[in-house]
Amino acid sequence: MKKTAAFGLFSLALGTACAATAQTGLDRTTLPIPDPQYPNSSTLDVRDATPPPRFEVKAPDGAPNVVIVLVDDLGFAGTSTFGGPVSTPTFDHVAEEGLSYNNFHTTAVSSPTRAAIKSGRNHHVNNMGGIIETGTAFPGNTGQIPNSVAPVAEMLRLNGYSTAAFGKWHETAAWEASIAGPLDRWPTRQGFDKFYGFLGGETNQWAPFIYDGVHPVELPEDPNYHFLNDMTDQTVAWIRYQKALTPDKPFFVYFAPGATHAPHHVPKEWIARWKGKFDQGWDKLREEILARQIEKGIVPKGTRLAPKPTAIPDWDTLNADEKKLFAHQAEVFAAYVEMTDHEIGRVIKAIESADQLDNTLIFLVYGDNGTSAEGGRNGMFSEMTYFNGVQEKVEDMIKVMDKWGGPETYPHMAAGWAVAFDTPYKWTKQVASDHGGTKVGMAIHWPRGIKTKGEMRTQFHHVIDVAPTILEAAGLPEPKKVNGTPQVPMDGVSMVYSFDDGEAKDRHVTQYFEMFGNRAIYHAGWFARTIHKAPWERQPRRGLAEDIWELYDTRSDFSLVNDLANKKPQKLAELQALFLSEAEKNYVLPIDDRVFMRLNGDLVGRPDVMAGRTSLTLAEGMTGMTENVFLNIKNKSKTITAVVEVPEDGGNGVILVQGGRFGGWALYVKEGVPAYDYNFLGLHRTTISAKEILPPGKSTIRFEFAYDGGGLGKGGEATLYVNGKQAAQGRISRTQPIIFSADETADVGIDLATPVVETIGSERASKFTGKIPKVTIEVEEVKKPETAQAD
């Protein structure tokens, strides 16, 4: 990172806040900093010798504590600060005491934004062209972060900081998310001394599968448990502990709630606060938000609402049940936003109570992308229906509306609300070629380092600018080598220049955007883009070469409503060429617009720990296997053979399970009787149960499923055998074709998180009371297609 004369004057003005390297002679461009070499001693008696001085790498004098808060799936209008309908007093206060930025961008989806914000490099340079579950064999899209893009957490840790990450990770390559490792891309090998959270893209807030470091956490038997409360408690405790033991050592905290990503799980008392406040519908809400944004100066006067996507119906055309259900979905989401802001406030209060707020650099990034429209037209009782191509019906969802947001649901809201929470823009999460997919509310707070208060900054910035800002504020150089690996220079630009100069000229002048074929280029105020696919569309609108490009001047067109492509074809062609140049330089090419197909590693060449295998033998105690590290049993025939040892009562509990309450299957014993359940998306359950209790001692239970074939998600015939004799038979009418869960696991002898079989339960209640020395699952070998068709 280049230092300028302006930075030198800024450092002098701040005293120690942006101090230069304090420990004279240390070369901080190569990390870790090696211990000094002392000559061998020739003194015989220690009493006659003088010990060398202790060597300890310390952060530069006055270096600030650093906190990055990254909220999930919340767009530009997600906070009251940015004109939204939800009260966010924490965000409001931070913006009033610090700075807010109304032109701050993300990558449009989760994993890429998270890798970029912590590395300062573009997401394809991190191999994060998409989320980790859609990794492919191509550089730029593998999902495996290279050693040449060390995260800022590791840079700070090796420069004397304590570091901790809490909440959502979603950056570990899909095939590496098991105890078999490698653990190189787990949080505690990516710069963090402490990690408490979940590895995947989302989790059940009522029953999460979480790690403390690399160890799974057993959930408490507490009916009021909620992960958002838990992770905040852990964060607060860590900050207090760190400052109690090492008060002079700065800390770096990455606080990344799973909120407000689906499932929208929030206690009833929070939901009750929002009853009736969205009855006006999303069209009127958009108008109200824009009026507030103009009044507050968040957007320029004269800004117009971008038209809704044609797939979003006008609120006035909905029937009474639709309005009732959809309004309640928004109430739950608003409650989730408000609760999240409250928990973030608890973290900030802990910093204040430790007398550290004055010299803590806080980034509040309220969204890793725009608000999610993956709920489709109607929203969802079970979000897993989206990934499996199932459209839920209003008449079914309204029956469970009163439970919405509780443990019995795994909900998402209708896409119309996502457009509203991205006001004044047209599009949403996944659409990297629209500001509704990339622009989010952001505020920075650092009393010792920022003189101005309550001002808004309009300079164009991107998540890759956060890491270089941290380094400059801490007085640290960008390292050229980390842990023996030469580093790719950061793509980001420090924002420090804008802290006390609202009129400063933009320094981040060019930025490409690409996600699943939606792509754009920003350059010096101009924005050229193409809409290749909407989040609810399973197929692209047209071929990549046939895409229609648009052109906008963001300096006079804040909401991207005035397409100048026909008026300025030369400028459009210039920007299209610039996009291709940036794309080639940043490993964006070849562009991959296959979305759902990429969830299947077999079809896109992603590494798979089960590659080529048709059987897996496990035993009791083997738990926590995510879908990407377990044998793929979907869309094929399978056989499960379990050897069990049971007491006189025949035993009770889970033998082998995959998934949970909102999709999965289980081989189990209920009060001595063996059975198999298939849970189709939490919508329909099939039980194949024997009639007799298992005899005491050793038994062999075998379950066979003969898949119908002829496509994805078909049914099949199921047969259960006990000690070689047929004990039950039945038909499973439908199966899940793509995914069981984003965070539920496969487990032997217990069902972690939520239960597949409600009468068995989960966690400690589901523990098998006998022994399971061996259980083998086998699948038929399915011939791979000769060519991978686009999904």
Image (tube, rainbow, N blue to C red):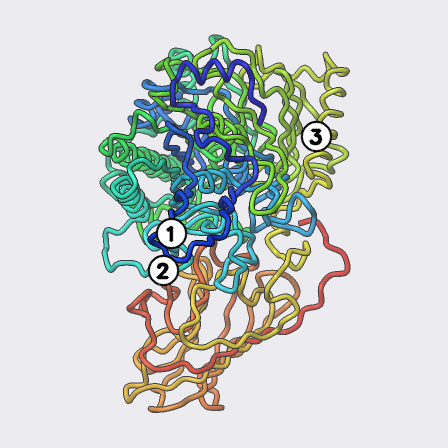
Which residue is painted at 42% across and 65% down in the image? Answer: 685
Residue on which the image places disc 3: 582
Query: Label 1 crowding class (10 Å Cα cut-off): few <14, some 14-19, many 20+?
Result: many
CA distance separating discs 3 and 2:
45 Å
Which is nearer the N-term, disc 1 or disc 2?
1
Asked if labels 2 and 1 touch by Cβ distance under 8 angstroms, the answer is: yes
Identify residue type, mark 1. Answer: Asn
- Compared with 742, 493 (above or below) is above
Report helix, strand or loop for mark 2.
loop
Chain-order first, disc 1 or disc 3: 1
Q: Which residue is mark 1?
A: 204
Numbered circle sitting on residue 354: none
Disc on the earlier residue, 3 or 2: 3
- In the image, 238 versus 19, the foreground residue is 19
The residue where tag 2 is placed is 754
Q: Position of residue 542 (x, y in %)?
A: 71, 37
Do we see residue 324 in this rendering? no
